[in-house]
Image: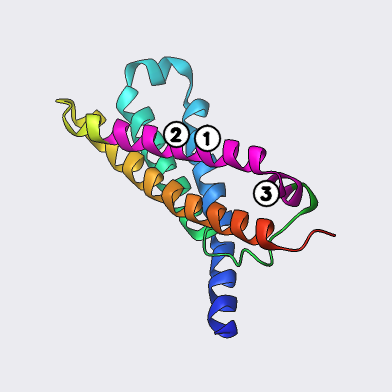
């Protein structure tokens, strides 16, 4: 079982190139110039849709890491304090629901650009859902661990 956890933990490192690609998709349209973007909004929406897809995939891969091995000092402070942990869990849940409902409403849109944008919104909400599960695991591990 430890080998399987190690494989998933190693797979979680794929999140970093995916975040880099998402960041590039976010920034590169700005290099085309605002004049170009104002007349070609579909180019901007297409890039931002791809950014949402890559970021959602990155969040999904980040949830594969072993929650017992990934713990920084500030993370321990957050997850051992129930009030702070609940705020983070609530914020993640609200963000996930926001992107899910945005995608759902976008399915009803008439414009093809908006329909394309919904794919990225749905994938990001699925990534946030898997990351929420990872956060719940972290919270359970840190609250059940003995206090030093």
Find disc 2 in the rendering and name its residue. 94
Q: Magenta residues, as a range?
A: 75-103
Residue shown at 71% from the left, 49% from the top? 80
Asked if the residue at tag 3 contacts the one at tag 1, i.e. Cβ–Cβ closer than 8 Å, the answer is no
**Label 3 neighbourhood size at 10 Å, few (<14), some (14-19), many (20+)?**
many
Magenta stretch: residue 85 in it?
Answer: yes
Q: Seen in the image, is 106 located left or right of residue 14?
A: left
Q: Kindly identify which numbered label has been placed on residue 91.
A: 1
- Report the Cα–Cα distance between label 2 and label 3: 19 Å
At label 2, counting other C-alpha atoms closer than 10 Å, the crowd grade (few under 14, some 14-19, many 20 or more) is few
Percent across and percent down for residue 100 are 33, 38
**Residue toward you, 146 or 134:** 146
- Contact? badges 1 and 2 (CB < 8 Å): yes
Q: Secondary structure at mark 1?
A: helix
Q: Is residue 69 left or right of residue 9?
A: right
* Image: 121 above or below 73: above
Q: Is residue 79 magenta?
A: yes
Picture quarter with the N terminus? bottom right
Disc 1: CA contacts within 10 A as few (<14), some (14-19) or many (>=20): few
| Front-most of residues 83 and 78 | 83
- Main secondary structure of the magenta stretch: helix
* Secondary structure found at label 3: helix
Residue drawn at point x = 45 percent, y = 39 percent: 93
Q: How far across and down, in percent of the image, does residue 59 sit?
A: 50, 51
Q: Residue at x 38, y 15 (%)?
A: 38
Q: Which numbered dot is residue 10?
A: none
* Camera-nearest residue between 30 and 115: 115
Residue 79 disc label: 3
């Amino acid at each position: 079982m430890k080998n399987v956890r190690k494989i998933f933990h190693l797979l979680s490192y794929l999140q970093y190139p995916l975040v880099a690609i998402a960041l590039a998709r976010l920034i590169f349209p700005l290099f085309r110039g605002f004049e170009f973007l104002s007349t070609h909004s579909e180019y901007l929406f297409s890039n931002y849709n791809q950014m949402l897809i890559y970021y959602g995939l990155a969040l999904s891969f980040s949830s594969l890491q072993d929650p017992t091995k990934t713990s920084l000092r500030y993370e321990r402070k957050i997850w051992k304090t129930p009030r702070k942990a609940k705020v983070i869990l609530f914020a993640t849940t609200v963000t996930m629901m926001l992107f899910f409902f945005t995608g759902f409403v976008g399915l009803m849109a008439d414009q093809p650009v908006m329909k394309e944008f919904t794919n990225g919104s749905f994938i990001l909400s699925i990534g946030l859902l898997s990351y929420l599960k990872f956060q719940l695991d972290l919270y359970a591990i840190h609250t059940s661990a003995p206090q030093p």
